[in-house]
Structures are given as structure tokens and as C-alpha cells.
Image (cartoon, helix red, strand yellow):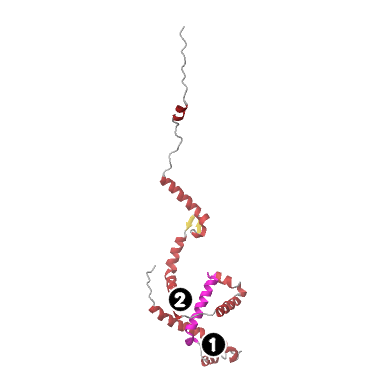
Amino acid sequence: MPKATKKITRKVTPVELVSTPVPSMTRKPMNSKLLGLLLIIILIGLLPYKLGPKLVPAVVDNRLVTRFELWSRLEKSYGAQALDDMVNEKILDRAIAKSGVKVDQDKLDDQIKALEKQFEATGGLEEALKQRGLSRKDLEGQIRTQLAVEILLADKINPSESDVKAQFEGGATTIYKDKSFDNAKAGIAEELKQAKLRDEFLVWFAEIKKNAKVKNFGL
């Protein structure tokens, strides 16, 4: 009868247990290019929801209308005129600053109050400014500039008594037929003043623009 084979077992020491290699469970890292592409796709998808009108003012059938496209279109259509307006504003502001003219705050406030009254029946001044894309600060700046120009050109734009009377007599049977000269002269004087202001301003501004140092690099 064959002898039974004795099974030999060996104890594993703690040192061997610790040093026994364990199969790696780490995954192969994702390709960096693929990861970058996925991130770009996710960001593009989030643009309309996270950034909204700052970068994407509209989405048409899941196709983005970017603000860069909008700016490019506006620049092509109105860029040259807008740039010229901005240059003119800088020249005008500089000329007024050099002149040392100061606008009285009370006159500015009076102009604002007159406009507030004028737009009471149509939703108020704030609504009128909103429709024109202007803020109250923009309006105050424009009025301050106009008042400063009026001061600079005062000796050329104030109509004489004879100018006012001639204007009244010319419309005595039409515009002013129901008014006396005394009742109409204040309004006539203001109309003549504003007409003269426009004409004299164009002449004056053309001269200061000609002498201004402007480097226009175009669009």
C-alpha cells in the first residue's frame, strides 16, 4: 500500500506579506488631446447658460451668435462714424477744458428739470433715456457740454432786438398772428439763439479740429 504523501505548508512571514506585489488597479490616463476636446465641447455647450449675453447674445437652432460676430457686423456698418464721433468728442472736451469755462450747476439742474417735465406724459425721462441707450450721466454730460459751448460762443449767438422783431414781423400773419410781440419775443429769441448756435458751432469746431493733433489709424 503506497505511503501517504505529506503535504508541506510554509508559513508566510509578515515581511513577505508586505513585500508581496499587488496587481496594479490604476487605469490608463485619458489622451490629453481628447480630454481638451471634450472640455471645449462642454464649455461651448455651457456658454449660452453660464455666460449668457456677455459672449453669446443669441442662439438659433443650437447655433451660437457670438458677441464677436455682433461687434464685427456693427464695426463694418457703423464703425467709421462711431470712431469719428469719439474723436470729435475728445477734441471738444479738450477745447472746453483748455478754455477754463465752468458751467453753473443750477443751470444744469434747470435743464434736467425741464426735460423731466417734457417727458412726463410719455413715460418719464428715465424711459426716454433707456430707449435711446443713454444713462442720466450721459445726458448730464451732453447738457454740460452744450452749456459750455454756449458760454464760449455767447458773443456770437445772442440775437439782437432788431433780429427778434424782424422774425416776429415775418410771421405776424401766420405763426404769431394770435400773439403780441411782448408775448412772443422770448420764444423767438431762444429759437434764433439755437439756430445761431448750430451755425457758429460748426464754424468754431471745424477750426479747432483742423488744429488738433489726431492720428487716425482706421478700423
Helix, strand or loop at disc 2? helix
- Residue corresponding to mark 1: 189
The mark closer to the camera, 1 or 2, is 2
Q: Position of residue 80 (x, y in %)?
A: 42, 70
Observer-nearest of 12 and 213 = 12
Locate residue 179: give its quadrant: bottom right
In the image, farthest residue toward the top: 1
Q: Is residue 58 visible?
A: yes
Residue that appears at 45% across and 28% down? 15
- Residue corresponding to mark 2: 93
Please, what is the dominant secondary structure of the magenta stretch? helix
Query: Is 16 drawn above or below residue 89 in the view shown?
Result: above
Observer-nearest of 144 and 30 = 144
Magenta run includes residue 218: no
Magenta run includes residue 136: yes
Observer-nearest of 64 and 211 = 211
Query: Is 166 drawn above or below residue 71 in the view shown?
Result: below
Query: Is 212 drawn above or below residue 8 in the view shown?
Result: below
Locate residue 26: give its quadrant: top left
In the image, farthest residue toward the right: 121
Name which residue type carries label 2.
Answer: Asp
Relative to 41, is 175 on the left or the right? right
Q: Which residues are magenta?
A: 131-157
Q: Position of residue 77 (x, y in %)?
A: 44, 68
Q: Position of residue 110 (x, y in %)?
A: 58, 79
First-in-chain label (1 vs 2): 2
